[in-house]
Amino acid sequence: MTKLRSYAYKLSRFFTILGMLSLLLVAFITTFSVGMRHVTGSEVIASINIAEFGLVIITFLGLSWTQINKGHVAAEFVFDRFSNNWKKILEVFICIISLFYMAILLWASWSIAMYGYDHSETTVATGRIIIIWPIRFVLPVGIFLYGCILLFDLKDSLTKLLKNNILKNYAT
């Protein structure tokens, strides 16, 4: 399990770096396109599509790294009011609910990605055809890796619960 976790962490870090590079590309293309519009009256071809693709990469490939660093938005002002034992129970509950939601999202996004692949999905931008089906696979890949990290966190949370006999204290 630790080897699998190590591979997932390395892949997550790689995807995060890919997302950061995508952010730089989106920022550069947007800035260059705005500059061209003011200077020449025209913009970079398909700059809007590139920005859309980049935002998908930035958002969904970075999910797992955010989970590894515990950087997701949380209601800390409520969560901090609970005792440590209740926090551990809530962590398990949150992981289970998140895994359920991610499974549904993974199934739906994979179906959409396969539909796009089967139909060679394209779009037209300023008279040019742009292939968009490959970007559809970013979402299921990012969600799958996020789900793996959630599973590792669930295992860790359950281990803490069972190790400290927290559930036994609340069962009586």
Image: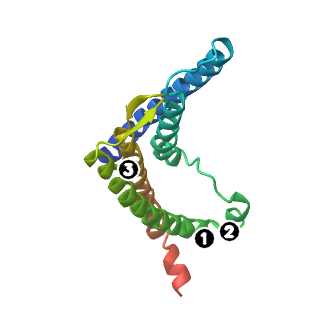
Residue 118 is left or right of residue 129, and the answer is: left
User: Residue at coordinates 49% horizontally, 67% vertically from top-left?
Assistant: 97
Tell me which amino acid carries mark 2.
Answer: Phe
| Image: 153 above or below 84 | above
- Circle 2 residue: 82
Tell me which amino acid carries mark 1.
Answer: Trp
Q: Are marks 2 and 1 in contact (CB under 8 Å)?
A: yes
Q: Are marks 1 and 3 in contact (CB under 8 Å)?
A: no
Image location of residue 68, percent across then percent down:
49, 46
User: Residue at coordinates 34% horizontally, 49% vertically from top-left?
Assistant: 113
Q: Are marks 2 and 3 in contact (CB under 8 Å)?
A: no
User: Residue at coordinates 44% horizontally, 70% vertically from top-left?
Assistant: 162
Residue 1 visible to an observer of this rendering: no
Along the viewing direction, whichever of 129 and 164 lies nearer the viewer: 129
Mark 1 vs mark 3, foreground winner is 3
Tell me which amino acid carries mark 3.
Answer: Pro
Query: Hey, which residue is sitting farthest top in the picture?
Result: 39
Disc 1, SS: helix
- Circle 1 residue: 86
The number of discs equals: 3
- Circle 3 residue: 140
State the CA–CA distance, disc 1 to disc 3: 32 Å
Image location of residue 11, percent across then percent down:
37, 38
Quarter of the figure with residue 78: bottom right
